[in-house]
Image (cartoon, rainbow, N blue to C red):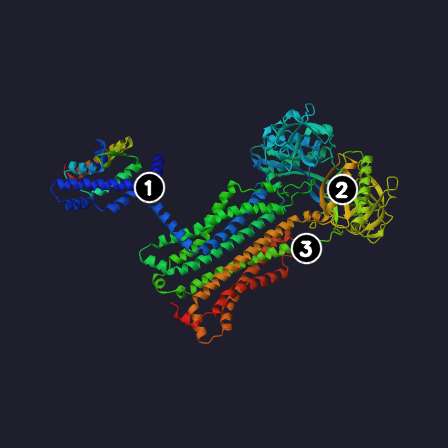
Amino acid sequence: MEWLDELRRRCAILLRRGRFDRDLEEEMQAHLEMQAAENRDNGMSAEEARYAAMRQFGNATRLKEAGREAWGWRALDEIARDLRLALRTLRRSPGFAAIAVITLALGIGLNMAVFALVYKVVLRPVGYRDVGRLMDVHLILTEERRGTIPMSWSYPKFQELLQWNRSFEAIAAFQTRVLTLSGIDEPLTGEIVSAQYFRMIGVNAQLGRVFVDEEDTPAGARSAMLISDGLWRRYFGADPGVMGRTLRLEGIPMTIVGVMPPGFKGETGRTEAWAPMAAYFMQNPNPGRSGHNLEAIGRLRRGVSPRQADEDVRRLVARMEREHPSDPSGQMKWSGGAQPLLDARVDPQVRKALWILQAATACVLLIACVNLANLLLGRGTARRRELAIRLALGTSRGALLRQLLVEPMLLALAGGVAGLLLAVGGLRALGLIFPAEEWSFQFEYARFIDPESLRIELPLVVCGVLLALATGIAFGLLPAWQAARADLNQGLRGGLEAAGPRHIRLRNALVVAQMALAIVLLAGADLTIRSFAALLATNFGVETRSIVTLNVQPHSRDGAVQREFYSELQRRAAALPGVQSAAVSDMLPAYGPDQGTVLHVDGRGATIDTGVLNTSPAYFGLFHIPTVAGRVFDERDGDHGPPVVVLGESAARRFFPGVNPVGRRIEYPHMRRDRAEVIGEIIGVVGDVKYGPPEVKARPVVYASTLQNRQGYFLEVRAARDPRPLVPALRQIAHTLDPEARVYDVRTMDQVIGLATWRARLAAVLLGLMAALSLALAAVGIYGVFSYAVAARYREIGVRIALGAGRGRILGTVLREGFVLSAAALAIGLPTAWVLTRTLSSQLYRVSPANPVTYLSVAALLLAVAMLACCLPACRATRIDPVEAVRHE
Amino acid sequence: MLVLKVLSQGPLHGYAIAKRIKEMSDDVLQVEEGSLYPALQRMLLKGLVTAEWVQAAAKRRTRVYRLTPAGRKQLAAEVTEFSRVFDAIARVVQPA
C-alpha cells in the first residue's frame, strides 16, 4: 500500500508542477536571505554576506534539479521534450507528416475493418453465454449419390436424444421458418424453440420475459410469443404496451410476452419472432419420425469434451437406428454427431476467404511500413549533419535513438486514430456491398452477415492501438538505429553523397521487398477478379433482360383456391400493357433447388439425385429456353390430363443415354397428393438452365407442370422494356384477387443473379482495392527512392552532363536502375505469388491459380508502374544544370 | 536520520533545520546546506514529513516541515539500526 500512497503523492505534485517549482525556489531563496541576514548581523558587508550564504548553500540550480528528480519526473520531462521536438520536426515537414499519416491510416484502418469482419464472422459468430460449451448436435445422412450431409432431427428422434444423452446438461431444439404475422405484410423469419433454448444461450428479454417451461408442454400450452427489438420498433413504435397484445401467427392467435434485446436476431441472424415448440406443434402436428425439421443445441456437462459428446451422439443414433430403422432398404445410412457451435456456425469457405482477406490487408500494412521506413531513412540522411552535431555536443546515442523513435511512434498513433475513423467508415461502406436483403426463405447460417453487427467494439480498439504501436516500432526502428549509429566524422563532413553505397543498398532492398509484396497481392487480386468475371459470364441458359420476379402467396391454403388464384394472376399480369408474358414457377434460375429428390427412372430402377421444378406452360417461352425435342406444357396438361414432365438436356442425357426420352416414363414426387410418387410421361426436352449459384455444380432437372403438380409461387413477368414500373400494378392485381395476399422478394432477374454472385463480388472488390492500394504505395516508394538517388548524385550527374553525356544517356542510367530493381522484385515476387495463390484455388471459379496470363499481366503492370515512378526523377536528372551542379555546396 | 531527529522535537522550516543540525553537532557535521532540500523532497514523497506554508514576517512565508507518524516510526527504526551498527563498530575499534 505504501507505494500506492507514494504514487498518489507523486501524481498530486505532478498536477501542480509550476507551483512546486515556485515553492522550492521561494524556500531556497528564504534560506539564503536568512543566512545572509545572520551573516550581516555577524558584521559582514551586505555583498559579502550574500556570497557567503550562497557558498555555504551550494549549487542552487543543481539542487533544484535534484529536488525535482526526487519526485521522479526526469524521464517524463525528457519524453515531453522529445515529443515537443518530434512535433516541431514534423511541423517543419507537413508534407511528409501528411503522407505518413494517410498511409498509416489506410493500412491500419483497412486492417481494423477487415478484422472486425473476421471477429464477427469467424471468431465470434454467436455471442452466447459460455459459448465454448455449446454444441451443435445433428444427424448425419450418408447416401451413395449425395455423399454425407448433416441433417436435422425429427420430433420423435429429438425426444430420444433428450432421454438417452449423457453428455449434455441441457439440449434445446429450434426450427426456422418463414412466418406470417397478422397486420404485417412482409414474411418474417421466425423460430419455433423449446423453452430450454433461451435459458441455455443465456439471453433474456429486454421487456417482459422469455418462455417458461409450462408454455412448452402440450398440456399447459399457452400461446405465447416473443418479438425482436427491430419488429417492436418498426411495427409497434417501441410501445411498451405491446405486451399482452395478441397477434395471429400463421393464423394461430399468440400473445406477446416479451421483446428481445436489440442485436439479438436468433440463430439465423435475422429472426424477428419466436414461438414455443409445443404450442406450435399442437396446431401443426409434427410429421413424425421422418420429418427432419428440428435443429438442436446442447450445453456440455462439465468435464465432458466435445469429442466425447460427438462419440456419445454417434452411439445414441446407432441405438435409435437399431430400434427404429429410418430406411429399411439400407440405402441411406444415418449417424449423428456434435460440433462446437462456434465452428458449426461458420461456413469453412467463408472462414478461409476471410482469413485470406486478412492476410492481404496485413500485406498492405506491411507495404505501408516499408514505405515509411524508406521515407524515414531518406529523412535521416538529410538530417545527418544535424544529428552528427548533436552527437558531437554530447547527446548519447541511446537518447538520440529514443528521440528518433518518438517521431514514428507519434505518426503511428496519429495514423492509428485516423485509421480507426476510417475503419468505422469502411465498415459502413462494406455494409453497402452486402446485399440489402437475402432471400427471405433461405436459411444459411453464417452466410448472412448482418451489417448492423459490424461495429468497432472495445477489443477491436485495443487491437488497433496495439497495432499502431507495433507499426510505429516496425517502421521506425531501422531508420532510427541507422541514423543514431551514424559515423560522426563523416556526418559532419559530407553532404548527401557521403551517405554511402551501403545506405542505398538498404533502401533498394526495402523497395524490392515492397514491390515483391505488391506482386503477390496483385496476383491474388487478378485471380479473384478473373474468377468473378467468369462467374458473371456464367451462362444460366436463360434470357434475363426485362424480367421481374415476385413471390406472391394467397392467404388460402386450399389447393383449388390457390390454383385459381395463380392462373388468374398470370392471366391478368399478361394482359397488362407493356407485358409480353407472365408465368409462375416454384424456382428461379440462379436461385437453386437446395435439395434434390431421388427419382426412379423407368425400366432401370436407377435412382438419380435430381431437382424437380414446377412451372407453368408460359415459363419456357418467357425465359427463352429452347425446346430441344418434343413439346413443352400447354393447356392440355391440366388436372384431368395424364401426368407429364419435361426434362432438361443433361437430365435426358443421364437418364436415357443415346435414346430419345420422349414418350418414356419417369417416377417423380407428386407434391399435391400428399407426396405420393406418380409416374409421368416425358413429353419433351428443353435446353439446360442453371439453378443455384454459378459455382455450385448443377443437378439434372425435371420439370413438372403447375397445372398438375405443386403450385409455383414465383410470378415472372417479361416486359417490353424496364419491368420495374410494372410492380405496383402487379401488386394491385394480387391484392384484388386476394386482399390478404402477400407480395415480397420483388427483384429483377438481374438482381437475382447479382444475389447469387455477391460474395464473389465482395472478394473481387476488396482484393482489387487492396492490390490497387499496394501498387500505389509501391509506386510512391519507388519514386521516393529514385528522387533521393538522383539528389544524392546531383553533382556526379552534373559533371557527366558537363563532360558531354547526352540527356538520353542520363535518362537511361536512372531507368536502368529502376528496371534492375523491378526485375529483382519480379524474381522474388512471382514465385512467392505462385506458391501463395494456391491457397486461393478453392475460392476460384474456372480460374487456375497457375494461369500464366495472370503472372504476365501482373509483371507487365508492375514494370510499367515502376518505370513511370522512376521516370519523374529521371527526367529531373536530365535537366540538371551542370554549372549549378558543380558549384553545389 | 538527522533531519528526522531534529524534526522529532517539533516542526521547523528548512533554514532552522540546517542551523539546528549544525548546532547540535557542534559544527562537526558540515554539509552543503542546500542538499537539505532535495532530501526533504524525498521525505515528502515517502510520506515521512508533511510541509505547510506559514506566514513568518510581513513579506515572507516559510515552509514548515512536520514529522508524520510514519516518519516517527522510520526514525525509531533508523536509530535502532544506527546504534546496532555503531555499537558493533565501537566493539571492534575499542580494545576490550
Packing grade of label 1 (10 A; few <14, some 14-19, many >=20) is few
Type of residue at label 1?
A: Arg
Q: Is residue A833 visible?
A: yes
Residue placed most toward the observer, A727 or A648: A727
Q: Tell me the residue that label 2 is attached to.
A: A729
Q: Tell me the residue that label 1 is attached to.
A: A17
- Does A646 sit above or below residue A499? above
In-image side of A347 versus B34 (left or right) = right
The answer to whether mark 1 and mark 3 are in CB contact below 8 A is: no
Which mark, residue A358?
A: none
Answer with mark 2 or mark 3, whichever residue precedes in sequence: 3
Type of residue at label 3?
A: Ala
Looking at the rendering, in which quadrant would you find the C terminus of chain A?
bottom left
Q: Chain of mark 1?
A: A
Residue displayed at 58% across by 30% down: A206
The answer to whether mark 2 and mark 1 are in CB contact below 8 A is: no
Residue displayed at 12% across by 44% down: A44
Looking at the rendering, in which quadrant would you find the N terminus of chain A?
top left
Q: Nearer the viewer, mark 1 or mark 3?
A: 1
Packing grade of label 2 (10 A; few <14, some 14-19, many >=20) is few
Q: Tell me the residue that label 3 is attached to.
A: A534
Packing grade of label 3 (10 A; few <14, some 14-19, many >=20) is some
